[in-house]
Amino acid sequence: MAEMKALQRLEEIDREIVLVSHISGVLEWDQEAVPPMGTEERSRQQGWLERKLHDLVASDEMGMILATLGADDSHVDGAPSLDDRSKALVRLRYASWNRERKLEADFVQKFAETTGKAHHLWANARKADDFSLYQPILSEIVTLVREKAQRYGYVESPYDPLLDRFEPGTTTKDVSEVFGVMKADLQALIDELKGRPLADDSFLYLKYPEDKQALFGKEVLTAMGFDFNRGTTGISTHPFTTSIGSDDIRLTTRYTEPSITSPLFGTIHEGGHALYELGASNTVTRGTSLAGGTSLAMHESQSRLWENILGRSRPFWNRFFPRLKELFPVQLEGVDIDRFLAAINRVEPSFIRMDADEVTYGLHIILRFELECALLAGSLEVKDLPQAWNDAMVRLLGVRPKSAREGVLQDVHWSMGELGYFPTYALGNLYGAQINQTMRSQIDVDALLESGRLVEITHWLDANIYRHGSIYRPKQLLENVTGKPLDPRWFSKYLSAKYL
């Protein structure tokens, strides 16, 4: 009886935590999608909400409930008698409680207020192409993140507890080993592609009216199965997807980049995230912490699966290219599907991560991972970031940014205090390639793409990944789906088959 009452109370508190998180999500959406007016007050609002969340997550009552359910460092899932859903809820709440109880509420509020101010300063610095406008607040954030890592505690690396927030069960050592294999494979592939003539992609940089781009994006999202009765789209400086309700999943894109490919594939990318969130919120998980992706790498596996493996394939464009030409007859005059495919799959080292091709993309992530580890270790200071960034770009990609906007100012994540986040992007590529291999052994993916039946692909992904939400750990879910642990070679095999 005590266990049953404890579970009931745990779910009550968990639902309140999710409710506050969704309220916070409204403010974040507004901050990104609507020009900010009251930055100071907005940061205080976010700070108050984060303090409220902290009080719920790290309370003494939460600790007693989890103890009653048998959760401790050796039994993070709680008592063996619990079912999978209950174990998952105990595991998620124990991880949060055990982490957040090490932070005082004042620290949590200060962190939220600082990052709330930082977003506006980052956006202004990026627009002005002036790192000095961003450096002071970023220095504050890095200091706070270092303190947070110390408070969380770690054995080997201060990066470990930060990474674990985004990719539970993965360590800095794990990432270093996987990235070592991936870096060697990517650089070998790039070397093989050197000397080949680059596809002409000049037509992608013409003027494409935004309203027609948005219309096409909406048509693709609809074909993918995005339910506009349960979500919407918007425009922001940095594309993102957020859940601010079980039936309110929102995604954005941006139209400020010179090429049509950024908003086009940005929309497909965020659509992959949104489909995961829609599927994860179902009758079993709705309104709880289980109603979301099990990790950011698994989330990224879905967005980059849709964006690149499916969205840049010939079968996909056999279906959608005629419609694109219909909307943009002047811009695509004389462009056939072969020329279009060559252009959107052009491999060339570039400055902007979000616009990078799928071969060089992983090197952008490795760069950020290395810089973050150095920042956390104290061997790199914020004032030296621009130079360190540019030097790493030359070392890894062979190009040097001409401006801060092309380099250190391009990403929003550090303004949010999210050090430890970036590795999940590259891990997502690896997860996605492995899942793609299994999916293609069970359904005819190319035939479904070519016939426009994308929703049947979504149904397979929903049955195998989305509907489970966060019930299973990411590594366990990957093995459940593919029958194998993570193997970075699947991604290398996919790239080699496509580009060689």
Image (cartoon, rainbow, N blue to C red):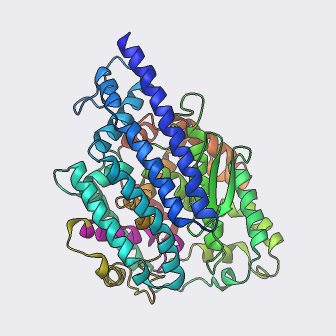
Q: Which residues are magenta?
A: 351-375
Q: Residue furthest top?
A: 1
The relative height of residue 55 versus residue 78 in the rendered view (above or below) is: below
Q: Nearer the viewer, residue 289 or 187?
A: 289
Which image quadrant: the N terminus?
top left
Q: Position of residue 206 (x, y in %)?
A: 71, 84
In this view, 66 is above or below 24: above
Examine the rendering and report whether any part of residue 310 can be seen.
no
Magenta: main secondary structure: helix
Q: Which residue is at 32% across, 79% downward?
A: 385
Residue drawn 42% across the image and 35% down it: 472
Residue 367 colored in magenta in the image: yes
Q: Percent position (x, y) of residue 247? A: 65, 41
Q: Indicate the position of residue 305 as horizontal and vertical percent values.
A: 54, 55
> Considering only vertical position in the picture, is 169 above or below 75?
below
Q: Quadrant of residue 146?
A: bottom left
Residue 106 visible to the viewer:
yes
Q: Nearer the viewer, residue 334 or 115?
A: 115
Q: Is residue 464 magenta?
A: no
Residue under the point 38% across and 51% down: 166
